[in-house]
Structures are given as C-alpha cells and as structure tokens.
Image (cartoon, rainbow, N blue to C red):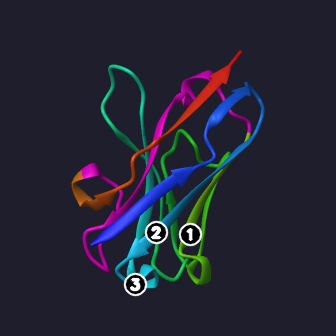
Amino acid sequence: QVQLVESGGGLVQAGGSLGLSCVASGRAFSSNTMGWFRQAPGKEREFVAAISSGGGSTYYANSVKGRFTISRDNAKNTVYLQMNSLKDEDTAVYYCGAGRGRMIMPTTPQSVGYWGQGTQVTVSS
C-alpha cells in the first residue's frame, strides 16, 4: 500500500509559477516510479510528467515540456512538480500517482497503482 498526499495548488496568474509536492507513505518510496497527471472539468485525466525510481529518467507531455519540471527527493519521500510559464489551459486538478511496478513508468492512468486525492491549480488570465 502507498498513501499519497499532494499540496501546493492554488490560484496563479498566467505566466506565473507554482510548485506542487506529493508526500508518500507506506511501501518504500525509493522503489516507486512516480507521475503527475491532471484532469480539467469535463475532460479525461491526462499524463503530465513521470520520473523513474532513482530520479535519473524523466518524461513529459508535449504540452508541458520546457515549462514543467518533475523531481524527487527519496530521503523525504516526496515528488515535486515545478510549473513555470503557466497558461489558462493548465487549469485542472493535479494528481500524483505511483506506478504499478518498479519498472512501469506511470505515463497513462492505467499504469498508476495508487493515486493521491488531488490539488486544484487555477490559472487566471
């Protein structure tokens, strides 16, 4: 079992920055691949970014590449998502997720084994 708690969401102006955190408890965090997803009203949950268990490999959706950065601190059981140059279309509930297995990179909702409760990010223009 893995429990995930996100924080850091809020309201930000377009062009601004926001950082999200996701703290994990339960199964050894350092063995988990981790990812961030988002879901806007009326839309399906979509992949944002993922990171390998050791942090050496990262993956991004094209829509956020160059603006968002995923990172992790295994000593703190925490994965981060730094979001810069935010746009209106980044408005969504952001979820962190743990991959289903050590070698499964969570790049689709089906590849996530555990979800956090989500945190709202609202970008105003």
Q: Quadrant of residue 11?
A: top right
Residue 112, horizontal then vertical, whole percent: 28, 59
Q: Distance between the residues labelled 3 and 2?
A: 9 Å
- Please report contact status of discs 2 and 1: CB closer than 8 Å, yes or no: yes
Give the mark, 3 or 1, whose residue is nearer the N terminus. 3
Chain part drawn in magenta: 85-109
Camera-side residue: 31 or 6? Answer: 6
Q: What secondary structure is marked by label 2?
A: strand
Q: Quadrant of residue 10?
A: top right
Q: How far apart are marks 3 and 1 (CA)?
A: 12 Å
Determine crowd level at label 1: few under 14, some 14-19, many 20+ residues with C-alpha closer than 10 A: many
Question: Given the image, on which type of amino acid does mark 2 rest?
Answer: Ala
On screen, residue 9 versus residue 34, left or right, reads: right
Q: Can residue 13 be seen in this view?
A: yes
Give the vertical position of 125 relative to 19 (above or below).
above
Question: Given the image, on which type of amino acid does mark 1 rest?
Answer: Thr
Say which residue appears at 29% left-offset and 61% top-offset. Answer: 114
Q: What secondary structure is marked by label 3?
A: loop
Give the vertical position of 1 relative to 20 (above or below).
below
Say which residue appears at 55% left-offset and 77% top-offset. Answer: 55
The residue wearing badge 1 is 78
The residue wearing badge 3 is 28
**Can you tell which mark lies on residue 24?**
2
Say which residue appears at 53% left-offset and 38% top-offset. Answer: 63
Quadrant assignment for the N terminus: bottom left
